[in-house]
Amino acid sequence: MSDGERFPRGKAMPAQSPLFWVQQKDRYLRQLLIKDIEETTGRRLLVYFANRYVKNSDINIGDVAHMQELLGDLDGAAADLFLTTTGGETDATEAVISLLNAHVTDLRTIVPHSAKSNGTVICLASNTIVMGPPSELGPIDPSVGGTPASILAEPIVAQTNFPMHKLGLHAIQQTNKLAKLLLTRGMMQGRPEAEVDATVSALATKNTYFSHGSVIDHKEAAELGLNVTYLPEQNELWQRFWLLYSMYAHDVQQSGAVKVFEGCARSMTLSPEAQP
C-alpha cells in the first residue's frame, strides 16, 4: 500500500485530489480498514452490505453483475465475504453462489450482524462461518415478490392466488435442494445423508423455527452441524469486523443507499433510484 493510499495516516497527502478525497472519504476510510483486515488475515475481504431499512434491499438478480465486478480481481486468492442481508430471491442467491464458487476456492463468510434466510444459504457455500456475539443466521425461507415463501405455501393462499402459491412451493423446494447440495459438497462433506437432511429440515421448516426472523446464534448454528468459528468480543479481529460493520451501518443510513459492494480496490454503492 503506497503512502498516498494510507492517508490520513502518516505524512503523505492523498493520492486523489483533496476535494475528491473529501467527497469520497467514507469509502476511502472503509477501504483503509478493509486493507488493514486483509493484512491481518492474509485473505481478501469482500463486502456485501444491504440496508434492511429501505425497499429493494433483498438479494435479487441485479446483484450478480455487481458481485462479478467485485470478484474480478481476486486471481484465485482465499477470500472472506463480509455479509449483511435479510435474504431474497433463490434464483439470484444461486447465481451469486455460482459466481463465488467460480472465483474462490477457499471461502469464509463473516457475519458481523445478520445474514438471514437466503443470506444463510450463501453462508452454507463457505468452508466456515465466522460469528461474534451479535451475529445471527436465520431459517432459510426464500421470498417471492417480497413475501416469504412459507406464507405463500399455506393452503389458503392456493384458494385465492394459485400461481403465487405454486411459486412459493417451488421456491421452497429449490432452496432446500440448494442448501443440501452446498452442505454435502462443503462444510458437512462426508457426513451421513440423514444428518445433512436433518440440518436442512431444521433450517427450512416451521418445526424448529416458527418465525421468519428467528435468531440462530453461533452456539445454535454449531449445534445444527454448521462449521462455525466464534470470535469473542475482546478478540482484536472481531473488533475490526465490528468497526467495519458500524461504518457501513452508519454510512448507508446517512446516504440512504440500498446496498454497498466493496473491496480494497473496488466499490459500488446502489442508490434507491438505481433499483428496479
Image (cartoon, rainbow, N blue to C red):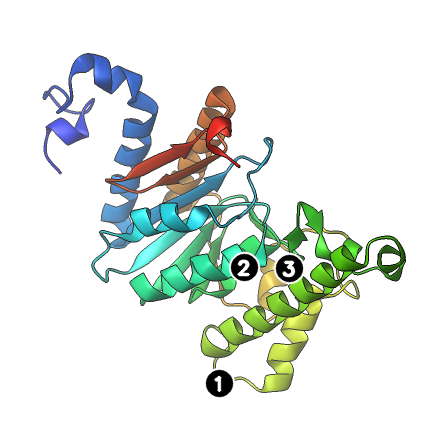
Q: Is residue 73 above or below residue 55?
A: below
**Image quarter of residue 47:** top left
Dot 2 alpha-carbon crowd within 10 angstroms: few under 14, some 14 to 19, many 20 or more: some
Query: In the rendering, at what x and y percent does residue 141 appear?
Result: 67, 57
For image coordinates 35% across by 47% down, the residue present is: 46
| 33 relative to 84 in the view: left or right | left
Q: State which tag comes first along the sequence, 1 or 2.
A: 2
**Residue 140 — which label?**
3
Q: Label 2 belongs to which residue?
A: 91
For image coordinates 35% across by 36% down, the residue present is: 268
Q: Name the element at disc 2.
A: helix
Q: Say whether residue 195 is visible.
A: yes
**Image quarter of residue 18:** top left
Front: mark 3 or 2: 2
Residue type at numbered disc 2: Asp
**Residue 60 — which label?**
none
- Between the C-alphas of marks 3 and 2, the distance is 14 Å
Q: Say whether residue 210 is visible.
A: no
Residue type at numbered disc 3: Ile
Q: Name the element at disc 3.
A: loop
Q: Quadrant of the N terminus?
A: top left
Residue type at numbered disc 1: Gly
- Between the C-alphas of marks 1 and 2, the distance is 27 Å
Q: Label 1 belongs to which residue?
A: 190
Q: Is residue 215 above or below residue 36?
A: below
1 vs 235, nearest the viewer: 1
